Image: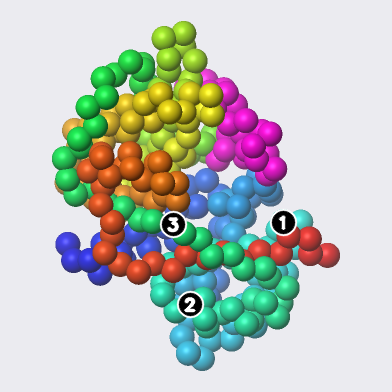
Amino acid sequence: MTNREIAKKIIDTENIAAKSFSNFRETDYGMLFYDEANPDSNDANHAIITKYDENTNFDRIAKEIKEFYLSKNLCPRIYSNLVLGQFEKAKDSLLNNGFEIETHDNYYLIHTAECKISEPYTLKIRHINQNDDLSFIFKLFEVKEDRRGGADRVYKTIEKQIKLSNFNMFVGYSENETPVTMAAVEYHNGIAFVDKVRTAEEYRGKGYARQLTKFWVEWHYKNHKDCLIYLLYNNPIAGRIYREAGFTDVDWNFESWSAYIDHAE
């Protein structure tokens, strides 16, 4: 698979990922994802502009997106479609319509080499299914860390995803049955991505995330050996773990940004 083909698969997957846990509406310019029952989740409530050219009226699009989310009492938010150049095309129209813009240092990695993590398994790792208790989420996410209601919004998202056959949630438990780390692997059209990665603050630096990473890499190749798997990170510590697990940089320039209106009337 060429670099361009890999990049296209990643972009296409990122742009539709929210379909697994959010409502959506297709438009002439892209997608509107929304979930009024989970208003604090940015991933469940955002627009993606995927259809545009040099003649596209971004002022009209920005205005329509703003009106759509405000009509549902949701924060208007737009995610980048990761394609280089969209930011410059849309920037002025977004600013003129009251959006604030953030750029993100996200790094995309694909698995290309042997996992070199030698950490012995001290955790009991479970493959969670829809009949399992999801209370581990509240033990892993401290609400005080996240002004957007961390655990609750993650719970509402996973509660929907866990029912899907292409979604796999793994949780590592300590000897006293305390959930300490988690990660999910989701499959779409011949490509897999890793998400919902979390280690409880008091258990970080103990090698638990390394154990879990080693586990789901091994699980993936045992069950989906011909499927490309990728992830993104913006934490240097996580990056070191992933590289030790055999992930390498995607050879492509992705453009990652978001735009939002925090206190619109």
Residue type, label 2:
Gln
Q: Single out the residue that lies furthest toward the bottom.
A: 55
Front residue of 70 and 6: 6
Q: Is residue 148 magenta?
A: yes
Up/down of 217 relative to 31, above or below: above
| Disc with the residue nearer the chain's start (3 vs 2) | 2
Name the element at disc 2. Answer: helix
Determine which residue is flagged by label 2.
86
The disc placed on residue 74 is: 1
**Hey, which residue is sitting farthest right in the picture?**
265
- In x, y percent, where is residue 223? 21, 35
Locate residue 85, reporting x and y percent. 44, 79
Q: Is residue 162 above or below residue 125?
A: below
Give the numbered dot on residue 106.
Answer: 3
Contact, mark 1 vs mark 2 (Cβ under 8 Å):
no
Name the residue type under label 1: Leu
Quadrant of residue 129 within the rendered picture: top left
Instruction: Identify the magenta region.
Output: 130-157
Mark 1 or mark 2: name the one nearer the start of the chain.
Answer: 1
Is residue 147 shown above or below 189? Answer: above
Q: Quadrant of the C terminus?
A: bottom right
